[in-house]
Image (cartoon, rainbow, N blue to C red):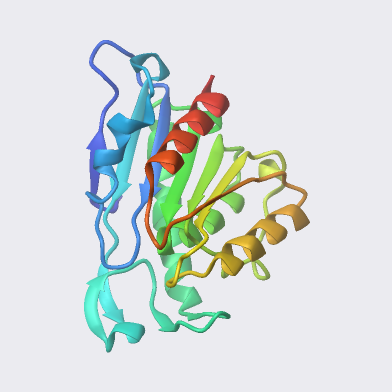
Amino acid sequence: MDYLPAEVLEAPANSEVNAAVIWMHGLGADGNDFVPVVPQLGLSAAYGIRFVFPHAPAMPVSINNGFVMPAWYDIKSLSVERSIDEEQLQISVRRIQDLIDREVERGVDPSRIVLAGFSQGGAVAYEAALSYPRALAGIVALSTYFPTAESLQFNAQQANIPVLVCHGSRDPVVPEVLGQRALEALKGLGLEPDYRSYPMEHAVCLEEIADIGAFLRQILD
């Protein structure tokens, strides 16, 4: 199997790996982007978490004049409605689901696997988690949107999946209205997401990191 390359933080040597967080970066970044966040999450070694930070492939991105950069899919327009290459998004989704399968093969129960993503990475996390055929532990959606909400093939195995949605109230890149629309779409699926808003732009703040840590402790306890 040709897996996406990734930065991996293994669980501490004195603990057994029994959970995994697969965390997707945003447009133009790479798998190193959120590695420094892990020590700030306040998670003890007892949780046995392996963090996997995959690198998106490089491709031309229309909104950036066709420049080649790491991206999960092409974005053709930054209008509020967003115009994306959904076929490319689905390719990324399948490759992330391959990483989920690899963790299962390594002995991690799907119910202890979390998908997290920032911006573009969050869009992939939504689709990859909600269409996956075995119940997962949760979704962490950061400063993102849900472009495939209407085309999603929702898998009933995810009927009770916990979701943490975080967004900046001053985000000029992905306006908060898109995060709120994702919230409503999730509720429409029968889910009960936790929504948090922060006075920030398209970024991550310390309060948010603390909330992510608390969410992971809650769903993995």
Residue 202 can be seen, yes or no: yes
Q: Is residue 217 above or below residue 1?
A: above
Residue at screen point 55% across, 55% down: 126
List x then y, in percent, for residue 104. 44, 33
Nearer to us in this view, 164 or 53: 164
Residue at screen point 60% across, 44% down: 163
List x then y, in percent, for residue 159. 72, 43
Nearer to us in this view, 191 or 88: 191
List x then y, in percent, for residue 47. 41, 19
Residue at screen point 43% across, 62% down: 119
Question: Is residue 192 toward the left or the right of residue 55 in the image?
Answer: right
Question: Is residue 26 toward the left or the right of residue 179 in the image?
Answer: left
Question: Is residue 65 toward the left or the right of residue 214 in the image?
Answer: left
List x then y, in percent, for residue 221. 54, 19
What is the residue that sits farthest to the bottom in this orientation?
Answer: 65
Q: Is residue 87 above or below residue 152?
A: below
Question: Is residue 106 toward the left or the right of residue 77 in the image?
Answer: left
What is the residue that sits farthest to the front in this orientation?
Answer: 199
What is the residue that sits farthest to the top in this orientation?
Answer: 14
Residue 101 can be seen, yes or no: no
Q: Is residue 169 above or below residue 76?
A: above
Residue at screen point 77% across, 49% down: 190
Nearer to us in this view, 118 or 90: 118
Give the image quarter of residue 29: bottom left
Q: Is residue 1 above or below residue 27?
A: above
